[in-house]
Image (cartoon, rainbow, N blue to C red):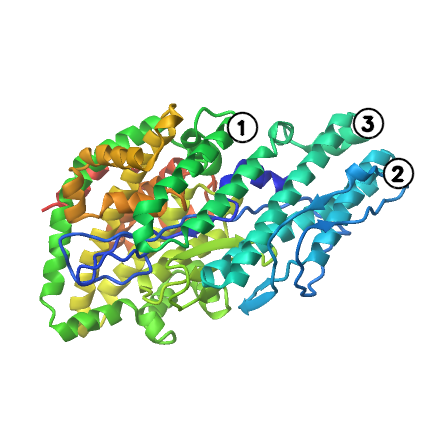
Amino acid sequence: MKKRWISLLLVLALLASLLAGCRVELPLGGETEPSQSSGTPTQPSSSATQPSSSATQPSSSTTQPSSSATQPSSTPTEPTGSVVAPTQPSTPQPSEPKPDDTITLESTHTPTYANSIPRLCFDLSEQKIEKIIKDLQTFKNAFRANKDLDAILNAWNRCEDNYEYLSSQYSISEFYYKSDLQDETYTESYLYTNDMYYGYHDVYVEVLKTFYNMDTEISREFFSSWSEEEISVLTAYDPEISKLEQENNEIVVEFEKLTDDEIMSKTGDYYVRFVKNNQKIAQLNGYDNYYEYAHREIYMRDYELSDLVKFRKYVGQYVAPMMPQLVNKYQQAVMNFSGYEYYQFIDFTEKYRINPSNNYLRSYFNSAPSPMRTAFLQALDDDYAYFADKDTAYDGAFCGYIETLGAPYCFFGSQNLMDTTIAHELGHYYALLHLDMEELSYDLAETHSQSNEWFYLHYLKTNAADSDKKFVAALEKYQQYSAFTTIVVATMVDDFEYRIYTETDYSKYSDAYFTEVMSEVCKDYGGEEYISNYITDAQYYWRMVVLLSPCYYISYATSGTAAYNLYLEAQKDLTQAYDKYMHISEKVDASSFVDALAEAKIPTPFDENVFKSYAEALGK
């Protein structure tokens, strides 16, 4: 039996994070504005620019059903300040709680009702928080009375429902926040929900711990169905973790307000605080450093750190050296275009946004096997995807599961949105309809999304009109360059973070030290000048991603390596490639990656022969 609060304890660092795309773009006219996988392919240049990034997912889980479970009221209000709920004792009547037992949740931020995003209503209010606290106080009073297990279970189920509601409101508040980073009401609502969620969680866990420690006949019966892991997590939890996570969220909000120029000069100072907080979180969870903690507990990777040492070596040995060939192939493809044809090519990559009802992407979705087709069209036609389409929105795309919605939801923020980005996020959407996000391996999740990009490209190669074949050929070259660039830079970021988080002398932490570490990392992938000429500005890139997605980026690299293999297989046997894709999206243990690939007979990214074959095929 799952407990909703357990997911936060196990993956706290990614509470409000969502699965997102990652791409490095070729700059248009030599500009270096950050962009995401949502950006269009741009005019060729000797260097590549850096993406804005986030890869993250909300906490989600299920709990024991309750016949008396109720959802909080949906009446919109606009409260301010702290909330103190009156005590509401359950039956049988316990002794009156002491004043210092009164539960309070505090915030200096103000929420505002919002319902402009289809299906996503943000309606958290002071009145709702009062009701949530009353339910928690009722649960506390019921177990203190220690007489009626049914009353305790009924009160507990209401607390679990409230936790689900708060978790969903936190996710929804992030969708609104990302839809317009300049809207102060959305920022305030996001920060308010952050305070309420973490505050409620801490109090809730303390109440449960108190009940467990009573060690009465009723408490033993209540906890009899809990696993050893759940009991261990409960008893070991330290509320300091929530405080550190809240501070990190505030750091990220401050970071996201930086201008491009400020990113280079100010990110290092934010990162010092951020890394120190993460190190404390890891230590409170019994780990020596955050890198190992994130690897095991947050991203649930089923391979060893020693496998990553080999993976980094293979990327430096086989992938990084072939980047000049890949960028040159893309350059040659678009250099044959006239100026008008080049802009036609840009439009070709963004056909869905130009004409949502008639485009290649929709045709691809209609051609896909039934389970995939149903999911893709549901997301687009039944309002499970939101297109912000404004310059003040977060310049990226992501997908997350919303508990109260009972479905995944996709966000697209860029005004220059490639069809491959939509395919990427709908790959997440399809898999999240079948696999539990709470248990999901993120390496596997990114295999779902990146593979769907390649299936779309394969569809174009076999179905595009003759007049569009030259654009398909250019898009394939772009996609190959972009995908393998992502493998290199994501691996470099992982290498960088490993060195930062395993450094035991925290006094070294500074912007200068971080810059020096990335310079050292670059040496294993061709050198800083080589990386700058053919891949990206490494010093800018790490600053863009390490606060938003700590220790996540290796998932893009491992999954990208596996996804390309499905593209190669699709060109030989499309039906078999689809079967393998649907297997890893619907039928595997969600927490596995290596085992899931093995089940579907997809080569592991830790096999040197895989890299050799890619280098031989592409590095010519």
Left or right for 199, reference 274 = right
Q: Residue at x 77, y 52 (%)?
A: 68
Residue 131 placement, left or right of 344: right
Q: Quadrant of the N terminus?
A: top right
Separation of residues labelled 1 and 3 (CA atoms): 31 Å
CA gap, disc 2 and disc 3: 17 Å
CA gap, disc 1 and disc 2: 35 Å
- Which of 571 and 87 lies nearest the eye of the viewer? 87
Residue at image coords 70%, 31%: 209
Residue at left 50%, top 26%? 283
Q: How many marks?
A: 3
Crowding around mark 3 (Cα neighbors within 10 Å: few <14, some 14 to 19, many 20+) is: few
Viewer can see residue 532: yes
In primary-sequence order, the first of circles 2 and 3 is 2
The amino acid type found where label 3 is placed reads Glu
At x 19% / y 37%, what residue is drawn? Answer: 525
Q: Amino acid at mark 1?
A: Leu
**Which element carries disc 2, helix, strand or loop?**
loop
Give x and y (percent) for residue 474.
17, 62
Q: Which mark is residue 217?
A: 3
List x then y, in percent, for residue 103: 74, 43
Q: Whole-percent x and y of residue 603?
A: 29, 39
Q: Residues within 10 Å of mark 1 (few under 14, many from 20)?
A: some
Image-based side of 32 in relation to 68, left or right:
left
Secondary structure under the numbered disc 1 in the rendered image: helix
Look at the picture and state if 116 lies above or below 26.
below
Do callouts 1 and 2 mark residues in contact (Cβ within 8 Å)? no
Residue 94's mark?
2
Q: Are marks 2 and 3 in contact (CB under 8 Å)?
A: no
**Looking at the picture, which amino acid does disc 2 mark?**
Pro
Q: Position of residue 254 (x, y in %)?
A: 44, 50
Residue tagged 1: 284
